[in-house]
Image (cartoon, helix red, strand yellow):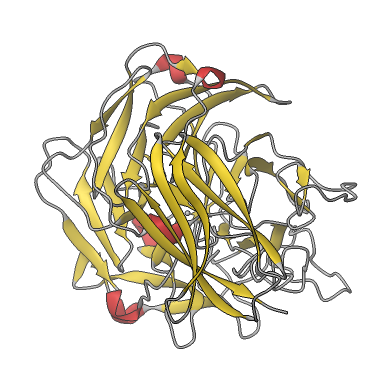
């Protein structure tokens, strides 16, 4: 769904707002009589028509009839006792086997603790009640230890080829500090592709014969389908073309969308989006795949990937790829002509710190999961959208970002966003609460701002910086290492 500044840490902060229709799209509460606890994924099951399933981050999955008149939900799985919701953890994704109506298999991605790790498991329907899943039927396919508790990816989906695709982030921390993005000997930082209908050796799955690194002599993991990702929190398959669309959450400057192909390198951490990383550096981009679309942090700070619309209710939207930004609340869409993204438009302004996923029902209609609100919304055409380039370059919410670099020596940059002119105080304290320096004091205009902090005269240690802007107040830590 970024480091503490950008991705799912903010996603899990409480925020209440009302989504309302603006030009372009009517965003309607799909189930007005229901509310969910931190909804984070939306799926359908083959052979179960007129029904959708909603995952709640804490570890439960709800089944509901796909109708605005629905008044009840049925809990079909509860693994909350095994799920850690620390930082960016939780029940992050799930998917039904393509032959679910025959075998009753459900696949789930979640994060336990002690140690914190990513787990992909299979559950079976309860033989005594096929409407729910047997908690004791769990069969673990993969367990991946995570060195940090962010950048977990979390999406799992079956592709049109019948194989299970799994998105894993780079292991977390800052700036790929564990050096996983370009390391094919690890599963982290990759899109994986496995065969869940067969097993090999001591694994509860097999590796498809046509995976790109099958039989390699470099000790690369053969589960890898494509590599070089930072945090591919959400991906989808185009139901018409089969194209794999992956949205990768950026570090500092770029949010990226890729059409992913087998065996290709999508660049992290050599590049972030299409630019060299760190920003301003030089790099060799030979052999790296560029995004089909990207945007900078003036447009948002944590991309939520969506779907190519293939429904019938809104013919003017057919073939457009929809995506949004969790932090800013923007909802965008563009056409892809096979070579480049065109006609990118801002369709709607959603409430900030909310959009965790898109969903697609049996008819190809699109839905949005709003984490903090607890609601699921459906997209419908309303009126003409607004071209994205005409949107004012003013942040939608106040944000205090994680300083960069961090750890630092001796200088670092602190960035913050203001949605309106504000009386601002930005101060630095030591761990005993003693003020070290006042970086900003006075009126600051709306917009994005950055402040340089030089700690040459300070000893190594952890420091606190606090932003006060009107009613907004937020505090973060930074580490000086000399």
Corner quadrant of residue 467:
bottom left
Q: Quadrant of the C terminus?
A: bottom right
- The residue drawn where x is 49% and y is 61% is 154
- Residue most toward the bottom? 114
**278 or 247, which lies in front?**
278
**Rendering coords of residue 141 (x, y %):** 52, 75
**Rendering coords of residue 239 (x, y %):** 51, 36
Residue 203 seen in this snapshot: yes
**Rendering coords of residue 75 (x, y %):** 20, 62
Task: Answer above or below: position of 464 versus 167.
Answer: below
- The residue drawn where x is 79% and y is 66% is 214
Q: Is residue 234 left or right of residue 186?
A: left
**226 or 322, which lies in front?**
322
Corner quadrant of residue 383:
top left
**Rendering coords of residue 114 (x, y %):** 45, 88
Q: Is residue 464 left or right of residue 248?
A: left
Task: Answer above or below: position of 450 versus 57.
Answer: above
- The residue drawn where x is 49% and y is 86% is 115
Q: Is residue 83 left or right of residue 201?
A: left
């Amino acid at each position: 769904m970024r480091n503490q500044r950008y991705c799912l840490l903010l996603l899990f902060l409480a925020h209440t707002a009302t989504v309302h229709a603006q030009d372009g799209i009517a965003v309607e509460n799909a189930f007005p009589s229901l509310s969910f606890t931190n909804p984070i994924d939306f799926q359908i099951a083959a052979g179960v028509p007129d029904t959708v399933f909603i995952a709640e981050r804490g570890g439960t999955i709800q089944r509901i009839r796909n109708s605005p008149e629905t008044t009840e939900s049925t809990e079909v799985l509860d693994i909350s006792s095994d799920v850690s919701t620390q930082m960016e953890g939780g029940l992050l994704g799930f998917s039904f086997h393509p032959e679910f109506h025959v075998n009753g298999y459900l696949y789930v991605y979640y994060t336990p603790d002690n140690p914190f790790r990513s787990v992909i498991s299979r559950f079976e329907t309860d033989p005594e009640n096929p409407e729910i899943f047997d908690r004791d039927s769990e069969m673990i396919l993969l367990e991946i230890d995570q060195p940090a508790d962010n950048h977990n990816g979390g999406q799992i989906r079956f592709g049109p080829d019948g194989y299970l695709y799994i998105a894993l982030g780079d292991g977390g921390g800052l700036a790929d500090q564990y050096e996983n993005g370009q390391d094919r000997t690890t599963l982290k930082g990759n899109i994986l592709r496995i065969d869940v209908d067969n097993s090999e050796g001591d694994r509860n799955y097999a590796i498809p014969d046509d995976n790109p690194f099958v039989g390699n002599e470099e000790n690369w993991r053969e589960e890898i389908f494509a590599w070089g990702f930072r945090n591919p929190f959400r991906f989808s398959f185009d139901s018409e073309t089969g194209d794999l669309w992956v949205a990768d959450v950026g570090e500092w400057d770029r949010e990226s969308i890729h059409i992913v192909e087998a065996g290709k390198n999508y660049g992290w951490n050599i590049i972030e989006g299409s630019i060299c990383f760190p920003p301003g550096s030089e790099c060799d981009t030979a052999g790296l795949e560029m995004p089909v679309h990207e945007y900078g942090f003036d447009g948002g700070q944590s991309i939520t990937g969506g779907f190519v619309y293939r429904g019938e209710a809104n013919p003017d939207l057919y073939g457009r790829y929809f995506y949004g930004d969790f932090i800013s609340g923007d909802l965008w869409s563009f056409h892809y002509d096979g070579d480049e993204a065109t006609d990118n438009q801002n369709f709607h302004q959603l409430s900030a710190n909310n959009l965790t996923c898109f969903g697609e029902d049996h008819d190809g209609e699109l839905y949005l999961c709003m984490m903090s609100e607890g609601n699921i919304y459906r997209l419908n055409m309303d009126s003409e959208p607004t071209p994205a380039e005409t949107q004012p370059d003013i942040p939608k919410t106040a944000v205090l970002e994680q300083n960069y670099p961090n750890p630092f020596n001796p200088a670092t940059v602190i960035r913050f966003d203001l949605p309106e002119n504000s009386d601002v105080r930005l101060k630095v304290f030591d761990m005993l609460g003693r003020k070290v320096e006042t970086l900003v004091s006075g009126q600051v205009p709306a917009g994005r701002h950055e402040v340089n902090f030089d700690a040459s005269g300070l000893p190594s240690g952890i420091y606190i910086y606090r932003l006060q802007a009107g009613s907004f107040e937020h505090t973060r830590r930074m580490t000086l290492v000399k």
